Image (tube, helix red, strand yellow):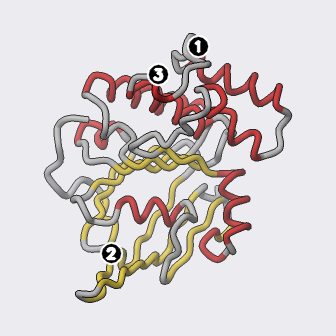
Amino acid sequence: MIPILVARGVQKRFVHPAGTVKVLKGVELAVQRGEFVAIVGESGAGKSTLLQILAGLEPLDAGEVLIEGENIAAMNDDAAARLRNRKIGFVYQFHHLVPELSALENAMLPLLVQGLREDEARKRAQALLAELGLGARLFHRPAELSGGEAQRVAIARALVARPALLLADEPTGNLDERTAEHVFALFREAARRAGAAVVMATHSLKLAQAADRAMTLAGGVLIAGIQMQLSENL
């Protein structure tokens, strides 16, 4: 079976006035459909940079990233955007919802970008939001939602197009513990139902231990297991 995601020899450096910093020095990762992988690491280790590269949002200096066999790292911006729209969902720590749009309209966006008819996009987005406990909040704008509700809308937006790969960058890091646990449980269950491969960056020991597999990003490479002291809280 071909993995949903394969990263080989991924390298990334940033040039600053004080010198060059090599953040990623040869990351290797393979994730199968339905697998949930947590990536942990110290602040500044490069977790967000790695997820951005995996999504084709940040260029790499060397290596390749294959999404169902297609090398997104070798594509131009337009081709990468088309692949991302078809196969990748992304959840940020801060939900990044469009403030002028309702919860329903935000969740519909990926389907409209794909060219789905508006009535069908609305139907699918509304059903998913209802599954995530937001059936009564469809027409509220982000400013009218709690932090947990807004993050659930962001999860719905990432899942609505049924992506093969779901990437999440500290998706519960801005929530209180109780809300974070609830959002994470919903997120994991929704991803499992969709059969998506999931890669999540987190600082939480509890969350990382709940994943199918945990890896530590340290020294620019991924190491199997949790190789650091993490927060006990989500």
Residue 195 screen position, x and y as percent: 61, 38
| 66 versus 143 height, above or below | below
| Residue 195 left/right relative to 9 | right
Task: Name which quarter of the figure residue 4 lies in.
Answer: bottom right
Q: Nearer the viewer, mark 2 or mark 3?
A: 3
Task: Name which quarter of the figure residue 3 lies in.
Answer: bottom right
Q: Amino acid at mark 1?
A: Gly
The label on residue 4 is: none
Name the one closer to the observer, 195 or 103.
Answer: 103
- Element under label 1? loop
Q: Amino acid at mark 2?
A: Val
Residue 29 screen position, x and y as percent: 46, 64
State if disc 1 and disc 2 touch (CB < 8 Å).
no
Residue designated by label 2: 23
State the quadrant of the N terminus.
Answer: bottom right
Q: Earlier in the sequence, mark 1 or mark 3?
A: 1
Name the one closer to the observer, 152 or 232.
Answer: 152
State the quadrant of the C terminus.
Answer: top left
Residue at the front extreme of this rendering: 100
- Element under label 3? helix
Residue at x 55% of width, y 64% of height = 57
| Residue 55 left/right relative to 108 | left
Residue designated by label 3: 144
For disc 1, the neighbor class at 10 Å (few under 14, some 14 to 19, many from 20) is: some
Q: Nearer the viewer, mark 2 or mark 1?
A: 1
Residue designated by label 1: 135
Q: Earlier in the sequence, mark 2 or mark 3?
A: 2
Residue at x 53% of width, y 48% of height = 90
